[in-house]
Amino acid sequence: MEIAIFWNRMRIPDNHHIYPVGDHALTVTFGNDMDPQLNQYVLALANELAKEPKWYLDVIPSYSTLSIVYDPVVIRKLKTTSAFEWVRAKVTETIKSSLIKLEVKSRTITIPVCYDPSVAPDIKRLAAEKKISVEKVIELHTRQTYCVYLLGFLPGFAYMGKVDDRIVMPRLDKPRARVPVGSVGIAGNQTGIYPLESPGGWNLIGKTPVKLFDASLPDPVFFRPGDKVKFKSISMEEFETFDQNTMQMVLS
Amino acid sequence: MIEVVRKGISDTIQDAGRFGYQHQGINPNGAMDLVAMRVANALVGNNLEEAVIELCHPASTFKFETASLIAISGADFSPRLNGKKISINQPVCIPVGSELKFSKPLWGTFAYLAIHKGFELNTWLGSKSTNVKAGVGGLDGRTLKKSDVLPLRFSMADAQEVTVFPWRANVSEFYPSLEYIRCIKGNEFDWMNRRSQIDFQKKSFTISPQSDRMGYRLHGPSMKRSHKEELLSTAVTFGTIQLLPNGELIVLMADHQTTGGYPRVAHVISDDRSRLVQHKPNDKINFKFISLAEAEELFCSQQQRIHQLASGCRHKLLEHFNMK
């Protein structure tokens, strides 16, 4: 794993839009696209807000939106008649006061994945539907470097994109009741890994031995938004003998 | 400590929720009926955010190995202490060896058992709320089962007999009998066609038996989309009403995911969450839009009333124990 830290000066564009998400959250949207540039604005704004004394409950980055969850009672104590208007003004001011000096801590992480059909129940079907070989699916999936746009759905579940057009595949019509932990899936042009056993509708094309969620760690979640991820094909034997500690060593 | 002598269907430890980690996909969890959780805590003189046991019908049976001051709020499952009926929303002092049992569900879906000073349990990321999916928080990250033992922080050393305190919290104002659940518009409300936009506000919806702590599914008129664009995953909250691909609606609840990609047609206002949560499968509900300003106002006033109730309770408890 390499960690490249670089500083990037960017101005968060003014053409954003802010709307309420109920009476205790709002969303700042920069568009409805899976675009690394828009995602950078989202992460930059999240970074900026994290520097201030915490007046919010949660800041949730997504592909091209940043959502802020707050307690209206707490905000209204700041001598304002509308919690929503106060938060909106605060966010607008933060965006305007950029040029933001944005710290992009971009880690490039290689994740070993076993693509053996015994742990990849959808890989043959995907290959058949796309009229390519299983080997080609593996090649296309491992060739790219993906961007972690956001974590959501499950603790530590990273939404990554975009996958090669030739292996884009819609979610299953009927989700599985039980997807094993570590399963690597494709949904549309996204790829992701189940950090926990869970019901799920992604097409399962592999499985990683890397533990992506560990409640006993102070930071229980492996990925962070902004991470760059590459997949490496490993054999069933390597999968079974994988030592979790080697991964932790590399990370620390 | 208290022991679970009979297992309930789905009882968990919950507090006000685990905030600050949603950017990692870790959802807040927490009590479904946050008002009832706070009222139960208020009645026993606790910090309002202290962890409590959330009970579903049929609920667990508990044996108290420690004399305790307890209160139950929210749903009424006809609690009985050593076979004798006790009221909810009233503090009760109980001696060692007492058995707390629930029988007939009279009202509501989620009841809350608070114990003076709370439980001696570890927190995970700042909260004791149970996250069953991740297997963390609460007691071993799961629902309570037979023979579980919950250590308590406090013992009412001199309690010899059951004492029902002569005051009670009037909670009716927190569950007003309105004919509708109040909402504010969701950002993708107009992704539905005109007909569905009207149906949402005019027709009734029935709560599906397939409802749980993650969400209440609704049966009703099939909602149709006019705008077919795919929504990229974005944040949702407790109370968000999503339109599912099959035309049904789901109201997201305490165990909701942090993000979702279904259109958010509306959001139940915070003041009405507890009232909605206490509905049962097959209950009918209607929706009505109000303004964001009104919603904020209602929630702030609700919280203020809870704090007033809490200070009233604290005063009563102090008075009671000084007199003794």
Image (tube, grey):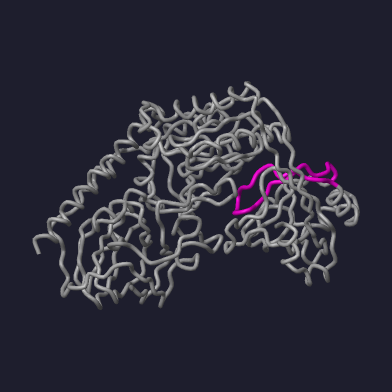
Report the number of numbered marks: 0
Residue B109 relative to residue B263: left or right: left
Residue B141, given in percent of the width and then of the height, sits at 50, 65
Q: Nearer the viewer, residue B251 or B235?
A: B235
Q: Is residue A157 magenta?
A: yes
Residue A231, given in percent of the width and then of the height, sits at 81, 54
Where residue B52 sits, quadrant-wise, is bottom left
Q: Which residues are magenta?
A: A144-166
Which residue sits at x=30%, y=75%? B63
Q: Is residue A177 magenta?
A: no
Which residue sits at x=32%, y=38%? B179
Residue A91, given in percent of the width and then of the height, sits at 53, 28
Residue B313 relative to residue B108: left or right: left
Which residue sits at x=47%, y=42%? A57
Residue B111 relative to residue A128: left or right: left
Where residue B173 sits, quadrant-wise, is top left
Residue B180, given in percent of the width and then of the height, sits at 35, 37
The N terminus of chain B lies in quadrant: bottom left
Which residue sits at x=49%, y=52%? B255
Q: Residue furthest left?
A: B323
Q: Nearer the viewer, residue B263 or B53?
A: B53
The C terminus of chain B lies in quadrant: bottom left
Relative to B157, is B47 above or below?
A: above
Relative to A142, is B289 above or below?
A: above
